[in-house]
């Protein structure tokens, strides 16, 4: 038995395969630009060939559901759902921001993942790690760097902690936080940049999914497919075409 993990939410495309004990058999993770749709399935085929694994050996799929590139997220989630339908196996989706934070769960304290969403906005998720166990602190959101900095600086539940910054939005967020230097110093909150890349690795999705897979070993194939049908990507934004359509509709209503 093997388990498959996929994430296509960032410029990096990652796929991984683990055995029945959760040990990593194979992983590939590389910056692919906008070639996710072209390269995802060939990479999975190569991985299966290299590990001498067949599709029928796969007993579960984990996928990063975003946020991130609208098209990229859709590609990964659609592929994962297709595998679940075709093989009738359990599918679990996780925040791609959470999977990114999972890699740094060894850093006790708060972890704030921020991925640049352009136009002075970021996708963000905040977590708290204790002895390698990651817990969510703030929900994933898309907001301006200034609004995110204000939310963190004025959070009454935060105090005397070091927050690790992760992702390609870290520098811009760090600069936005300087406006609240007095408030942060008064609460003994400091920041450090851990990693300025926006990355997700399949093995981290595996770690998040493993307890759920073990709990779902007795799940019927019918239930597995039913659960997969309910999974939806986490875009945290409208597609550009839909956003423009709504804007036009608003202008038309205003002119009436």
Image (cartoon, grey):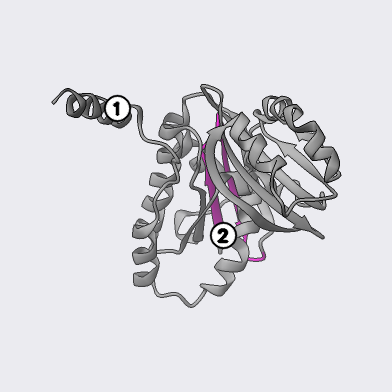
Which residue is painted at 56% across and 23% down in the image?
120
Q: In this view, does 51 lie to the left or right of 102?
A: left
| Residue 192 visible, this orientation | no
Q: What stretch is highlighted in magenta?
A: 2-21
**x and y percent of residue 163 in the render?**
78, 43
Residue lying farthest bottom? 218
* Residue 154 spot, x, y in % from top left: 69, 43
Asked if residue 204 shows in the view, the reply is yes
Nearer to me, 129 or 121? 121
Q: Where is residue 197 in the image (x, y as percent from the top left)?
A: 68, 30
Name the quarter where the C terminus is drawn. Answer: top left
Q: What mark, if any, has residue 241 been given in the picture?
A: 1
Kindly state the secondary structure of the residue where label 1 is placed: helix
Circle 2: element type: strand
Q: Is residue 79 above or below residue 146?
A: below
Q: Residue at x 71, y 37 (%)?
A: 166
Q: In this view, does 19 lie above or below 77?
A: below
Tell me: 191 left or right of 134. Answer: right
| Chief secondary structure of the magenta portion | strand
Q: Which residue is drawn at 73% across and 46% down?
A: 111
In the rendered image, residue 154 lying in the magenta stretch gets the answer no
Query: Which quarter of the figure has residue 239?
Result: top left
Q: Identify which residue, 244 or 146, lies in the foreground.
A: 146
Image-based side of 136 in relation to 9, left or right: right
Q: Which mark is residue 232?
A: none
Q: Which residue lies furthest to the left in this view?
A: 256
Percent x, y for residue 20? 62, 65
Does residue 136 sit above or below 183 in this rendering? Answer: below
Numbered badge on residue 2: 2
Foreground mark, 1 or 2, reads 1
């Amino acid at each position: 038995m093997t388990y498959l993990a996929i994430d296509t939410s960032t410029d990096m495309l990652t796929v991984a395969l683990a055995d029945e004990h959760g040990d990593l058999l194979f992983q590939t993770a590389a910056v692919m630009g906008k070639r996710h749709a072209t390269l995802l399935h060939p990479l999975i085929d190569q991985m299966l060939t290299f590990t001498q694994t067949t599709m029928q050996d796969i007993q579960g799929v984990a996928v990063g559901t975003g946020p991130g590139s609208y098209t990229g997220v859709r590609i990964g989630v659609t592929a994962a759902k297709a595998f679940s339908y075709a093989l009738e196996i359990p599918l679990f989706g996780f925040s791609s921001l959470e999977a990114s934070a999972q890699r740094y769960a060894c850093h006790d304290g708060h972890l704030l993942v921020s991925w640049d969403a352009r136009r002075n906005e970021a996708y963000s998720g905040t977590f708290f790690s204790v002895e390698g166990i990651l817990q969510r602190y703030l929900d994933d959101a898309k907001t301006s760097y200034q609004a995110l900095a204000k939310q963190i600086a004025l959070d009454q539940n935060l105090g005397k902690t070091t927050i690790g910054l992760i992702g390609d939005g870290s520098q811009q967020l760090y600069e936005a936080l300087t406006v609240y230097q007095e408030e942060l110093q008064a609460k003994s909150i400091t920041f450090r940049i851990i990693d300025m890349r926006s990355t997700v690795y399949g093995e981290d999705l595996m770690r998040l999914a493993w307890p759920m897979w073990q709990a779902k070993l007795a799940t019927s194939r019918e239930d597995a497919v039913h659960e997969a049908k309910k999974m939806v990507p986490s875009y945290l934004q409208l597609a550009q075409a839909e956003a423009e359509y709504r804007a036009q509709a608003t202008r038309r209503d205003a002119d009436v």
